[in-house]
Amino acid sequence: MSGFRLKTGGAHVTRERILTFRFDGKTLEGYEGDTLASALIASGRKLVGRSFKYHRPRGVFSAGVEEPNALVELRTGSRQEPNTRATMAELYEGLDAASQNRWPSLRHDMMAVNDYVSPLLTAGFYYKTFMEAGQSGWHVAEKFIRRAAGLGRGTHFPDPDRYEKQNAFCDLLVVGAGPAGMMAALAAARAGLKVILADENVHPGGRVFEESGRIDGLEPAVWAARTAAMLEAEGVRLMTRTSVYGYFDGNVLGAVERVGDHLREPPVFTPRQRHWTIHAGRVMLATGAIERPLVFSGNDAPGVMLASAGLAYARRFGVAVGRSVIVFSNNDGGARTALSLHELGVPVKAVVDCRRAIDAGMAEELAERGIRVETGAVVAATRGRKALASVEIRGFDPDTGRLGDNGMHPACDTLLVAGGWTPSVHLASQAGSAPVFDEGLHSFVPGTPREAWTACGACSGRLDLASCLESGRDAGLAAAAALGKAMAGPAFGLPELSGVAAAELPAPVFEVPACGRGKRFVDLQHDVTADDIALANREGFSSVEHVKRYTTLGMAADQGKTSNVNAIALLARERGLASAGVGTTRFRMPWTPVTIGALAGRETGGHLAPVRRTPLHDWHVEQGAEMMAAGRWMRPRAYIRAGETLEQAYVREARAVRASVGLVDVSTLGKIDVQGPDAAAFLDRLYANPMGKLAVGKARYGVMLREDGILFDDGTAWRLSGSRFLVTTTTANAAAVLAHMEHCLEILWPELHVNVTSVTDRYAALAIAGPASRAVLASALGEGDVSDAACPHMGIVRGRIGATPVMIARLSFSGELAYEVYSDWNDGPAVWEALLAAGANDAITPYGMEALGTLRIEKGHITGAEMDGRTTLADLGLGRMASRRKPYIGSAMLDREALADPGRRVLVGLVSQDGNPIRTGSHLTLPGEAASLGHVTAMTFSPVVGTHIALALLAGGRERVGDTLEAVFPMKDETVRVKVTEPCFHDPEGNLLNV
């Protein structure tokens, strides 16, 4: 036990409201306003987790988003969430948290054996080991490595919570509600700008809560609350619990608001999180700075934490982080923190400063309070594995970096480290600006903006409160001026300050030489040590980007927040350069982890995209159709009668079409209206076969290619007039074909005068097919002639069914005499009912997708299963359609060697030789051999053939017609003997189309 609750203090907690929570099964108590981390520290917990690679014991290290150690699993069941930073998890009644990355328990982790074999697990371990071991070695080790990989465990249950997405628009977005951000927002709002102020914390104010002086005569916490109220009164939209995680082109930023994360369960209709897409005229980056640790042996022991965190826990939550505290620093911040902690009741034992001397006034104050001061000294090592027990203090020469020979070993339970401050430049870097090294801060600051942003406060290198306030106000007024606004009257003055701290500029000391056997960690989250960085440089990975990837430095949830600058300094030393010469990595989004739920919003499951229904949907359901999804559309699979199986139903429907007449709903086909004086020329450039000379009143089957010569889509083009076509596409490709047309008209051929419009939802479409289809259609028509003379194959006529105007094209997907009947969308049910009534004496049969598939497979027609992004016209037996007399998209690639290879997989038919079904996706092999020659694309039971048949893509397929192969489906361990045939099983001469 070490941490404890102070008797007074805690600006964020309400001591009257006690909350109970559980950690690793043990019930503990905290206060309303606590974070999980502050409550754990107050309960005396030092050990809260295990490290990623070596499974070393770890404790809370920070008090904010930069936390690398205290990653926990929150909640249980369907709401279980791994890798949650305990420092950002707000305490609520009944919170259930667990440590992670340990087995069987946190105190007794068997995987800690990794620490004892750590010399074998250095940087680049996987690369070196498995390059030598080869594939066989990798396959042996893979299952063990994957089992050990990762940190927390996600749930296997669906997420029950609600997520939302929303857009926001403003003149100025201020990121960070610290003193600089609040002043910037206040100045801009008073100048007349529409301002959004976003901050990831619950309370606006930033690090002002750690100040010990007065602001306008007020306690810093009181001043922050008063200023927040002033901002809201000025119309500023204050968004707390909102992390701005990404900066995108055009001053668009992504943010996630934690709406219900601080609740056990969000109320009904309240989202757990809300994703914001913020469109800003200008952006103010007031993202603050993060304190740096120092690199020394054993710097990861539970009880070692940032000095700023120790002060934050005391001031914000009334928590003392230890009962015997030592502060180790390279700047005045260490001594200042020690004095503040002492005043708050935290027992501080000593201050260790690597510089030869500290400020005389502070040294005197420390001595008066009985706090020992060791200058020209460093903490060289720690003792204690599961909790800090003591430190080794040794003399240190800051000029040469050498340690003294003799040391002392004072006992302590907490070591606070202060290594300087690192401005949070992540968003500026995401916006394309390379950070610039500041020699005074020994860190990087934002570079030259490429977007409309400005940095202010600690983010821009101004570390003292007075400079933060001034830079924020001035930046807010400048943003207003840039947007054409100016404050009416004189500019408001800055708050009066008393007793606040000056800037804390560090000595250029980042590491302490190795002392004993303890590891010197640079990246606590990924267990990257100083030795790993040196090894990477020795092995040729000397670029900072290469070091990052070779060692995994700065890759995890903290994105290098506490490790980057120290790593760069160590790499610079290894290379004999200054840190500015080494540079820094490019920071990528997100600044903080973002849940997939927040990105998805409500667009999950059935809400991923709108479910689309044809105008006949209700009729299909009323008639007992089994509905199925076809893309986003719902279509009838089959009309299954009592006692029928699915196969029996679709076979009955298919037989009815072949024998008499059937009716199917094809309203889902893509339909695009193409109009303009250049419409014919446009389609001629799109389709592989000629379209330009198609006669008015005629339709033509056509195919489109991609630019690489691969088949893109097929469909029909109906010429309705000299300058107007109706183009149909496959259901799945309707949007893609429309986008393709728009791209061509806007980018490739802007000179063409053509307009394209989707009319998929404009027309209901029905297909009537079978030997009796003409007679039934003619009987239903009040106006119009569908005789062979008036409407030959591929002809178009207009007429009326009842009072409904219809457009009819004689097209067939089944191989039978067939017509497609188009009407207005809302008139579809009336036309359908009229055709059913007209065909009653011919036993007209509605049929669904399965029968439609059976008919098309028997005829050898292709669909998306054959147009799989790899096939050409020649592969599918359509090579003769490709025109050689005109240029069109993809024509230049038709004779490419790879596309003309005689060994390519081509379309063939298959017939089951043993009566068993041929599974779609089966591999085709020679009997007794394993090599795949192709695969099955579609299968059905054929009433025409009397057994199961299939279409397939088979290497050298045309030469294999008549051969017997095996269709192997390894997932089910099934093998079916098949005979290779031509792909058309029914009426190969096409006589039935012309009756």
Image (cartoon, rainbow, N blue to C red):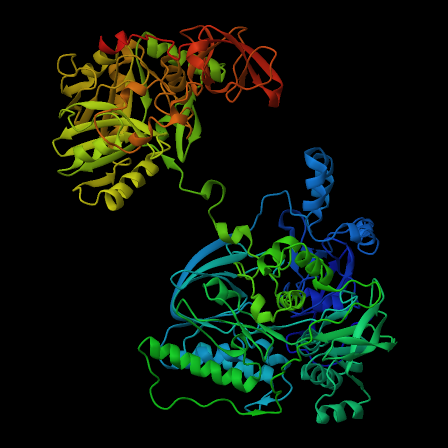
In the picture shown, does residue 633 fall above or below 512? Answer: above
Residue 625 figure quarter: top left
Residue 443 figure quarter: bottom right
Q: Nearer the viewer, residue 650 or 621?
A: 650
Q: Quadrant of the N terminus?
A: bottom right
Residue 198 in the figure: left or right of residue 421 = left
Residue 862 image point, x, y percent = 37, 21
Q: Residue at x 33, y 75 (%)?
A: 483
Q: Nearer the viewer, residue 331 or 573?
A: 573
Residue 674 image point, x, y percent = 20, 36
Q: Residue at x 41, y 22 (%)?
A: 901
Q: Nearer the viewer, residue 208 or 775?
A: 208
Residue 667 image point, x, y percent = 31, 29
Q: Is residue 30 something one can see in this rendering? A: no
Q: Is residue 903 something one can see in this rendering? A: yes
Q: Nearer the viewer, residue 969 or 397?
A: 397
In the picture shown, does residue 15 fall above or below 79? Answer: below
